[in-house]
């Protein structure tokens, strides 16, 4: 008799749980359909871009800048150095890269061989 009571209690609890989850089933299936549609649209868009259709350089540049921004932000959040050290390092690197760019563009004309100087 004790086992029968336990089985009945489990059946009632399981039935009540399923009854409570029933409205969520419809919402979940709707969300799953929406997710499936978005995944399909993203897949089609990626295929179009891989095939060279519907690309704009402005859109690509925007996505590249967004990726760089997210990468820098995550890197700064996860960096083991303090904020002041990180800012100092970033500033030094930016000045170094800027100096190299200025040096490359401000140097004299190249020789016809593609080397600097007359050699």
Image: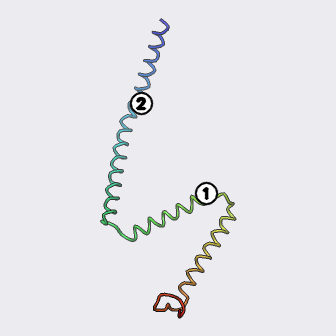
Mark 2 Cα within 10 Å, few/some/many (few <14, many 20+)? few
Is 52 placed above or below 39 here? below
Residue 11 placement: quadrant? top left
Q: Position of residue 90 (x, y in %)?
A: 63, 69
Is 96 placed above or below 35 here? below
Residue at 41% over, 26% down: 18
Residue at 53% over, 61% down: 71
Q: Position of residue 32 (x, y in %)?
A: 36, 42
Pointer 2 residue: 21
Q: Which element type, helix, strand or loop, lies under badge 1?
A: helix
Q: Position of residue 7 (x, y in %)?
A: 45, 14
Residue at 43% over, 69% down: 61
Pointer 1 residue: 77
Residue 42 placement: quadrant? bottom left
Mark 1 Cα within 10 Å, few/some/many (few <14, many 20+)? few
Q: Which element type, helix, strand or loop, lies under badge 2?
A: helix
């Amino acid at each position: 008799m004790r086992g029968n009571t336990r089985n009945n209690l489990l059946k009632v609890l399981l039935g009540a749980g399923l009854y409570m989850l029933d409205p969520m089933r419809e919402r979940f299936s709707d969300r799953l359909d929406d997710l499936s549609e978005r995944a399909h649209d993203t897949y089609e868009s990626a295929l179009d871009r891989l095939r060279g259709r519907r690309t704009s350089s402005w859109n690509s540049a925007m996505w590249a800048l967004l990726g760089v921004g997210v990468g820098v932000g995550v890197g700064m959040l996860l960096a083991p150095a303090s904020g002041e050290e990180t800012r100092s390092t970033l500033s030094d690197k930016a000045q170094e890269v800027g100096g190299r760019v200025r040096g490359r563009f401000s140097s004299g004309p190249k020789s016809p061989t593609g080397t600097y100087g007359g050699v």
